[in-house]
Amino acid sequence: MPRAFITGITGQDGQHLAQFLHDQGYDVYGMVKGQSNPRIAAVLEEMPFIETVPGDLADLPSLVKAIEVSQPDEVYNLGAISFVAMSFNQAELTANITGLGVLRMLEAVRMVGGAENNPIRFYQASSSEMFGKVRETPQTEATPFHPRSPYGCAKVFGHDIVVNYRESYDMFACSGILFNHEGPRRGIEFVTRKVTNAVARIKLGLQQEIVLGNLDSKRDWGYAGDYVKAMWMMLQADEPDDYVIATGQTHSIEDLVERAFAEVGIEDWRPYVRQDPKFFRPAEVDLLIGDPSKAKRELGWEPDVSFPELVSMMVRNDLEIEAKKAGIAL
Ligand code: GDP
């Protein structure tokens, strides 16, 4: 059986990818940080097939050991400090984990795997946040980066060091420049899940309003389940390369809010939404829209789930969760 090693296994993408690779017949190893990681128990309950391996993106020797123990054919580096808003407050930590963590992971793979004798294939989770103050629309693999947050800056370093290791050491290393991707496993701090969860609670009478920041920024939102498949497809290609993974469509936060409320039959959402400066960011990414044509042409990848389907899936999921928690029959 092929073996896959995943960092960030307790995150949204780590969970989707673990399930996908398991279904493909992989042995799945997940790196877990800390002695009592709060999220791993819930993940293992759902996916008991995951073999956990201790390791920390801040600690190169632990990564070398983790790769030695799991002997993977494929490494997926999804671990990161991933919340843009938090990266402004913890900029150095973000640079260390989200940026330098990539270098450490590549180095561990290079030390253990060796390029010629055991070419471990490496996937790096690059991000559309690297485009930031966008230089052109839509964004492609050739669009220059202009990150707008410590998170975006750290991801640019990670992206560049993957290209550098590929060119310097002939490693099979790929970056997926993934645009925002969401789903029922998304953390509540991200705007999609924050909105769908609040809409469900408002519908059930458990909450009065939702407090948001900037409603004008636009994102190219896809479904995480579609996007992890693209990660895997990149590592099955003949040559390593970088790919934009996106839907090619963009929506404002206001569109998201409107559609989520409409899903529960509320047409006028304005009385339920308040804005608070505390949710605005020191620098904003105004508009993201990706051009996924290279991934379609070279990998045969296309997203299945549309934006309305995604919002509907997330609202229905939150309705079920919140109704169950509150003991309300739907
Ligand atoms: P990001 O694209 O990785 O930063 O994903 P987020 O889901 O955190 O944010 C997407 C956009 O939603 C950004 O432009 C935010 O400024 C905007 N936004 C507006 N209100 C909120 C809010 O209350 N929480 C979050 N997380 N984002 C918000």
Image: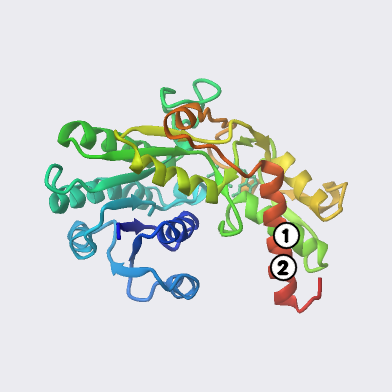
Which quadrant of the rendered structure holds the C terminus?
bottom right
Q: Is residue 251 above or below residue 208?
A: above
Residue at position x 68%, y 69% in the image: 321
Q: For mark 1, does the 10 Å Cα neighbourhood hold few (<14), some (14 to 19), or many (20 or more) residues?
A: some
Specify the quadrant of the image occupied by residue 124: top left
Q: Is residue 173 above or below residue 145?
A: below
The residue wearing badge 2 is: 320
Name the residue type under label 2. Answer: Glu
The label shown at residue 316 is 1
Name the residue type under label 1. Answer: Arg
Residue at position x 64%, y 33% in the image: 250
What percent of the width, then of the height, locates residue 133? 51, 28
Judge from the rendering whether residue 283 lies leftward or rightward of residue 201; answer left or right: left
Q: How is the image coloured?
A: rainbow
Q: For mark 2, does the 10 Å Cα neighbourhood hold few (<14), some (14 to 19), or many (20 or more) residues?
A: some
Q: Is residue 276 visible?
A: no
Confirm or deny contact between disc 1 and disc 2 (CB under 8 A). yes
The label shown at residue 148 is none
Please name whichever residue, 33 or 277, is drawn nearer the observer in this view of the structure: 33
The answer for how far apart the CA atoms under marks 1 and 2 are is 6 Å
